[in-house]
Amino acid sequence: MQNTDSFKRGTVDLAVLCVLKEKDMYGYEIVKAVGEKSDGNFELPLGTLYPVLYRFVENGYLTDRDEIVKKRLRKYYHLEQKGEEYYEALLKEYRKITGAINLMTGGEGNE
């Protein structure tokens, strides 16, 4: 459904920051963590993830570092204080909006 895709795109920032609060991760690991934490309800394509990561690094929300693991170079992303503050602001706004939608539609659990 197109509306579902649009809604998910609007929550990508929140999902990425949420999993990076737990630990530093590389791209594919972020995708897997988002899928696991959402019980498979939120699929995050790598092609969607990397522009978000690049923007976050540029804005100072994340830093990145290269690390060689089993002879492969991986770029790990670390959530900085500025990123934590951005996450908290996004989460507050998300909860406000979803709370309003729940009120308008008759509460949680409506499908």
Image: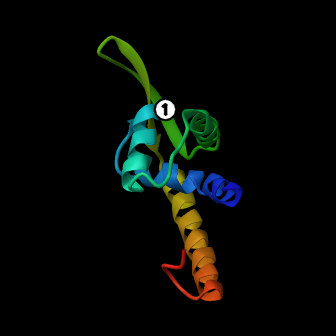
Task: Answer whether residue 81 is visible to the viewer in this image.
Answer: no
Task: Answer whether residue 33 is visible to the viewer in this image.
Answer: yes
Query: Percent position (x, y) of residue 73?
Result: 41, 17
Query: Percent position (x, y) of residue 85?
Result: 53, 60
Amino acid of disc 1: Asp
Residue at 61% x, 33% y: name it. 47
Residue 35's place in the image compared with 11, above or below, is: above
Residue under pointer 1:
64
Image quarter hosting the C terminus: bottom right
Which sits in the foreground, 3 or 46? 3
The answer to which image quadrant residue 29 occupies is top left
Query: Percent position (x, y) of residue 58?
Result: 64, 38
Which secondary structure lies at badge 1? Answer: strand
Image quarter hosting the N terminus: bottom right
Q: Is residue 97 left or right of residue 87?
A: right
Which sits in the foreground, 10 or 3? 3
Residue 84's place in the image compared with 43, above or below, is: below
Residue at 53% x, 59% y: name it. 87
Number of numbered labels in the structure image: 1
